[in-house]
Image (spheres, rainbow, N blue to C red):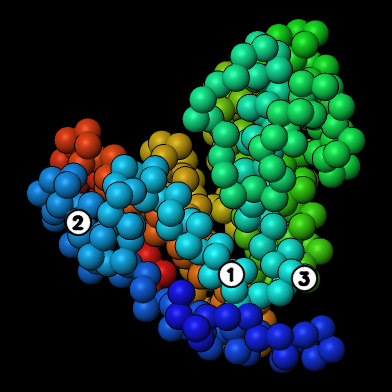
Amino acid sequence: MDKEFLYDPLLDDELLPDELFTSQVAQIRTKENSLLSDQDINGLMQCPTYEDCIQFLLDKGWGPAEHNTPEELLSVEREKTWTLMRQLCNDKQMKSFDIFRLSTDFHNLKVALKESYVQKETPNVYMSGGTIPIETFRKAAADNDFVALPLTMMRAAEEARDVLFHTGDSQLCDVIVDRAALESIYKAGKETGNDLLFGYAELKAAAANINIAIRACKANKDIDFLQRAFCECNSISAQKLIAATRNGLDSIYEYLETTSYSDAIDALKESPAAFDRWCDNRMMKLIQPQKYNAFTISPLAAYVLAKENEMKSVRMILSGKLNHLDEEQIRERLRDSYV
């Protein structure tokens, strides 16, 4: 890492809030030049083979070369991103980024609970990059003692474990943990006091509620399931969405017409993947103005989200090449780029 990408100890908590990030933002603007542009994504798409794609990425600074499977490459890129953030920010500032890592924590909690239930470790299912060590989850689940976890996570773990061990219902276990994850992300977004981070939390909660509504309607889930699954947020009324879900898909679409997600309806009707793409593209629109906001943490958060979005597109292209999908099939899955 170049020397200029280092946290400046002079930027401490004694400074006014609008002075905290001017140096870091100036440095992150230069790093944005390394993000893949639409032209780069097109170049990657036009590579004739998977091996050519890997070489293209290596030439763009991905890698190192010995990490040339999709997951290895993505893991290395993600760690590069967090290394950069740790170099740019002090410990207190880094706490604002926990909002992006909470999903990983709750995923690992679900894995640990299910491993404990079947009494067998499963390889390659835990995710790195969370705020809590994987072994903490494993030990907590094995000992049925979750006091080492944050309060919301602890309560969800206890309830989910009780459901799993008494009913064997792994889907309900997931619902309990997933709702707690959304609530934790939403709370974290509010507590930052940052518009971008709260916007991220708002979209994540609303999108999850909409996805749950569509799936639950198709599966004819009962009222108890719906009340357990939905997370309250500002832009979606959980109670109105529950009522719409019980009345069928058309009622869900009618309710969404009254919200800021009316333009997502066509994507929802097309497929779950199309809606996921719509959500990611909406997030890119949300973060685009932040690259010019030089006095807050927003440009740094925008860079993290842009990098995650970039990695989704790369993953889809690499997967498509490995599975011999044609170019049109791959392109329809790609997200808008940040640069």
The answer for how far apart the CA atoms under marks 3 and 2 are is 38 Å
Vertical placement of 147 versus 89: above or below? above
The residue under label 2 is 55
Q: Mark 3 packing: few (<14 Cα in 10 Å), some, or many (20+)?
A: few
Q: Residue at x 79, y 16 (%)?
A: 163
Residue 177's x, y, as percent?
73, 32
Answer whether residue 259 is visible to the viewer in this image. Answer: no
Q: Residue furthest left?
A: 48
Instruction: Mark 1 and mark 2 in contact? Answer it, CB < 8 Å.
Output: no
Residue 73's x, y, as percent?
36, 50
- Which element carries disc 1, helix, strand or loop? helix
Residue 308's x, y, as percent?
47, 57
**Which mark is on residue 92?**
3
In primary-sequence order, the first of circles 1 and 2 is: 2
Residue 239's x, y, as percent?
78, 38
Answer whether residue 322 is visible to the viewer in this image. Answer: yes
Q: Residue at x 84, y 44 (%)?
A: 150
Amino acid at circle 2? Gln
Task: Using the image as rendered, state which of residue 251 and residue 235 is in the foreground.
Answer: 235
